[in-house]
Every structure is written in structure tokens, then in C-alpha cells.
Amino acid sequence: MKAAIIGGTGYGSIELIRLINKHPYLEVGTVVSNSQAGNKFSDTYPHISEIIEQPLEKFEPNQLADKNDVVFLATPSGVSSRMVPELIDKGIKCIDLSGDFRLRSVEEYETWYKHSPADEGYLKKAVYGLSEIYPEKIKTANLIANPGCYPTATTLGLIPILKTNLGDYDSIIIDAKSGVSGAGRGLSLTNHYAEINENLKAYKLGAHQHIPEIEQVLTDEAGNPITVSFTTHLVPMTRGIMCSIYIKLKEKVTTEDVHQIYDEFYKNKPFVRVRPIGKVPSTKEVWGSNYCDIGLHVDPRTNRLTVISVIDNLVKGAAGQAIQNANIMNGWDEQAGLQDIPMYP
Ligand SMILES: NC(=O)C1=CN([C@@H]2O[C@H](COP(=O)(O)OP(=O)(O)OC[C@H]3O[C@@H](n4cnc5c(N)ncnc54)[C@H](OP(=O)(O)O)[C@@H]3O)[C@@H](O)[C@H]2O)C=CC1
Ligand SMILES: CC(=O)N[C@@H](CCC(=O)OP(=O)(O)O)C(=O)O
């Protein structure tokens, strides 16, 4: 099956290429580039020389739909929303890595993303692609809104406890940290080496576009309105996200009790690894892989649960989950092409 990619020279795209190249049922089809059409892909990324040798192409929706079976849009928000309708109308399945189809409310989108939302008719067709939680909806979807990187780590870390009545869900605090590739390949002063090296920065306080996405998922799963305190930090590393999540518990429960809840919840989910009691995952332990690793601890003095959730932002946080969704949509093993051991050290 041929997979097209739009947003060819970005980080999401080059990670999709790496994963599709070793996928048993997918092969790289058309790769669209807005800035480099006509140039060889390996001119931008020499590490794919002699492996993927093809020109980058212009966006031609008719040709794209004729020559490919699925399209991954690794384009910025505001761009995907303009491209998806033309593609969906031609009958090709789309998996969008941007935030354009994740929020159900167009007003919320405008408030947080600060530009025009996608057409509401197409928004209604989109299925939120949190693979572990919505596999049944994903199976029959034609348009997947692939989750954001921070929302993936956060919601997978929170949903099992939310499904119980044990927590005080007005008290959720998420302290989130990301490597610099989370900001994409575009140049900016914030991500300049001298600005980020030996530095730790909090950013977008109270204004991060992932806040409404996290609250939408948690509210759906809890069945009650949930608001969260969510603060993002930029860390001088290339890949990786760690979300340290804090929830006050209403009853006296132990780490063992909570561990059992998470173990049971994720027992048939191969990409979520709940660490043994006393073990805390680090970002390097999921590097280059589609795993979300979770560590749990209840502090008996404060009766507060701490959840540590780590992912690779470019894999489980973007391209890997997109491939997992393509696997589910096609009825393949959800692990197809994603079974690598994380790269270490
Ligand atoms: N990086 C990450 O960890 C994650 C990213 N995402 C989302 O995935 C999407 C891709 O992210 P990422 O690859 O990191 O971003 P990049 O900035 O690295 O790449 C995006 C690519 O989109 C293309 N593009 C940029 N502007 C336009 C435009 N106006 N019209 C058409 N194409 C354009 C460019 O490629 P070209 O010129 O070759 O077309 C650009 O390289 C984004 O929506 C991002 O928010 C989601 C989760 C995690
Ligand atoms: C480190 C860094 O800057 N990360 C980005 C993640 C953006 C992203 O993934 O965008 P979506 O909204 O499409 O999910 C940020 O915090 O905005």
C-alpha cells in the first residue's frame, strides 16, 4: 500500500519515512514539499541517500489520490485544514499530524490556535487517533486527527485513574518537558543552540494549544468537565517528552493499588509499558520507539499520586502513532513496522 506524505522536509515527515521504509505493508509513495519541489529528497536529508531516492513533488491532489492509498499530512496547523477536504473528497484516507482536526469546537480552536478553524463538516468526520483508547472508531475512520505529543503522554498517563473515583480531579497538575525537535525543523531564536543549550525554559504558560485538547479527552473519559494546570518546558535534548502529573487522592490508596489499576487497564496494549513499583521511566528508555512508559508513586504523607509518562515526541507523539493508526485502519497488527527496541544509549 502506497503512503504519501505532505510536509516533506519536516521532522514529522522524515520520521514517517524511517518507519514506512521498514513497514511490512506500506511503502513510500509521493512525498510533497512546498519549499523543495523538484529537488531530490536526499539533498535535504543525506542520511537517506541510496535508500529513498526520489524527487520531492508539488501538491497535486488528483495525482496524489490516484497514486497513493493513504496520505499523512505532516504540515503545520492552518495548512492541513486547507488540504484535507480536497483529499477526502477524492476518496483517499488522511491521517493529519497537525492540531487542525483535534478540537471539536471551532471557537476553542480559534481561541487557542489564533487562526481560522477547519470546515465544521470535515471536523465532524475526524476521529481522534489516540490509538490505545479509540481503536474501534479508528478502524472505520477516513480522517484521523493524530493526537498532539504532550496530549498523548498526558492522557495515557491519566485515563486509568480517571476511570476510577479515587482522585480529586480538580487538582490535576501536569508538568511537561520536551526536547527541541518538538518544535519542528523551522528556525527560531527560541530553539537556537546558544539559547537552549545549558538552559531550561518554561513557555506558553496558560496559553498552550494542547490545553483544550487534553481537557477535551479527559472530560470525555471522565464523563465530567475536567480542567488542568499544564505547563510546558523546553529541555536541551533532541527528542523526548516527560510529563510529571500530580493528582490528589480522595481515599487512602497505596502505590500497589494504583499500579494494579494501570496494569489491568493496559494489559492488552503493547505500546504502553507500566513500570514495576519503584521504577521510574526516563525519556531515553523510549528513544526512537513507539512506547509510552509510565511510572507510578503514591506519597502516603500527602496522599497524592505522581504519574511519570514518557514518549518520543516524534514517534508515539507523532509519526509512530500515525503508523499505528494506519495499521488499525487497515486491520493489520497494530505493531506492524513499529516493533523496534528503543535506541540506547
Ligand atoms: N515535531 C513533533 O514532535 C510533533 C509535531 N506535530 C505536528 O506535526 C506537524 C509537522 O510537524 P514537524 O514535522 O515537526 O514540523 P516541521 O516544521 O519540521 O515541518 C513542517 C513542514 O511542513 C511544510 N510546510 C511549512 N509551511 C507550509 C505551508 N505554508 N504550506 C505547505 N507546507 C508547509 C514544510 O515542508 P515542505 O516545505 O517540505 O513542504 C515544513 O518543513 C505539525 O502540525 C506539528 O505541529 C505533532 C506532534 C509532534
Ligand atoms: C517543543 C515545542 O515547541 N513543542 C511544540 C509542540 C507542537 C506540536 O506538536 O504541535 P501540535 O499543536 O500540532 O501538536 C509546542 O509546544 O508548541
Image: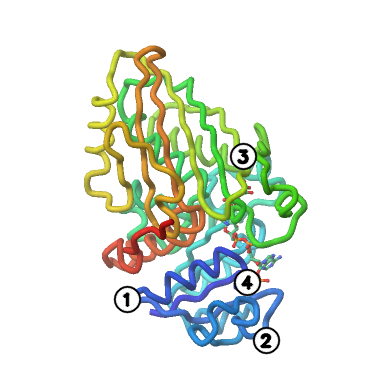
Please give the label number shown on residue 38.
2
The structure residue drawn at horizontal position 32% and vertical position 63%, both measured from the top left corner, is 339
Residue 256, by quadrant, is top left
| x and y, in percent, of residue 99 in the image | 57, 52
Q: The residue under label 3 is which amino acid type?
A: His
The disc placed on residue 9 is: 4
Does the CB distance between marks 3 and 4 fall below 8 Å? no
State the SS at label 3.
strand
Given residues 236 and 121, the one toward you in this image is 236
Disc 2 residue type (three-letter)? Gly
Alpha carbons under labels 3 and 4: distance apart: 25 Å
Percent across and percent down for residue 319 are 47, 62
From the viewer's side, name the closer residue of 131 and 69: 131
Q: Quadrant of ligand 1?
A: bottom right
Can you identify the residue that label 3 sits on? Answer: 233
Q: Residue at x 50, y 35 (%)?
A: 215
First in sequence, mark 3 or 1: give its number: 1
Q: The N terminus is located in which quarter?
A: bottom left
Q: Which residue is mark 1?
A: 24
